[in-house]
Image (cartoon, rainbow, N blue to C red):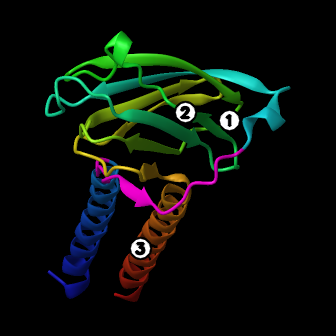
Amino acid sequence: MSPTMIRRPAMLFLLIITVASITCGAQASRSIVFLPQPLSSLDIINTTLHQNARCSFTVSIRTSCSSPAQTRDQISLAFGDAYGNQVYAPRLDDPASRAFERCSRDTYTVYGPCTYQICYVYLYRSGYDGWIPYDVTIYGYNSKAVTFTYNFGIPRDTWYGHNYCRSHTVKSAGNLAWNLLSIGSTMLYTVASLFRG
């Protein structure tokens, strides 16, 4: 066998392995769950400015089974999209209604400005009981349902949550560009090798 005939199958194999590893890597990166982070300050946007564009959202908050049986903590919520549309819901808690009990799910209808895809959520806990959220799911008119996972205690008197507005856009664009560059360079190398020999 000539060296050229041996080189072609090896280059083709290299190309197939490269494409498969890039595809598997892109799939695996989607399953990463990021931990919530503290936010030093949250600018609460005055939602009365958006009275002509009011939408309703369904917010489902599950309390962790590691949370205290009951809580008197005061819980507030803020969420929004990448375009500055923010919904603020102060004081969702109501001890008389047995809200936020251990292993429970509480569902609220919240009104605010219409949004695009929800990409951030922050919870604010004030009190000493140590309520622990499990997750927050938000359903909106122009937004797919989105769930943000917590499942551990959040600090008192601090906005705490997830903000994927910038990171997903930048990360997705960066991953796509890198994947395309890798595939393109591998294909060029393979084609050049095939014609060379």
Q: Please, is residue 137 above or below residue 21 in the view?
A: above
Q: CA distance from mark 2 to mark 3?
A: 48 Å
Q: Residue at x 27, y 34 (%)?
A: 134
Is residue 43 located in the magenta-colored stretch of the structure?
Answer: yes
Q: How many marks?
A: 3
Q: CA distance from mark 2 to mark 1?
A: 18 Å
Quadrant assignment, res 188: bottom left
> Considering depth in this image, is 27 or 104 the residue closer to the camera?
104
Q: Foreground mark, 2 or 1?
A: 2
Identify the magenta region. Answer: 31-45
Question: Would you name the residue on which mark 2 appears?
Answer: 90
Q: Residue at x 55, y 59 (%)?
A: 166
Q: Position of residue 138 (x, y in %)?
A: 49, 28
Q: Position of residue 104 (x, y in %)?
A: 25, 18
The residue under label 2 is which amino acid type? Answer: Pro
Q: Earlier in the sequence, mark 2 or mark 3?
A: 2
> Considering depth in this image, is 18 or 188 the residue closer to the camera?
18
In the drawing, what numbered circle is on residue 182? 3
The residue under label 3 is which amino acid type? Answer: Ser
Neighbor class of circle 1 (other Cα within 10 Å; few <14, some 14-19, many 20+) is many
Question: Would you name the residue on which mark 1 appears?
Answer: 115
Q: Foreground mark, 1 or 3?
A: 1
Disc 1 on helix, strand or loop?
Answer: loop
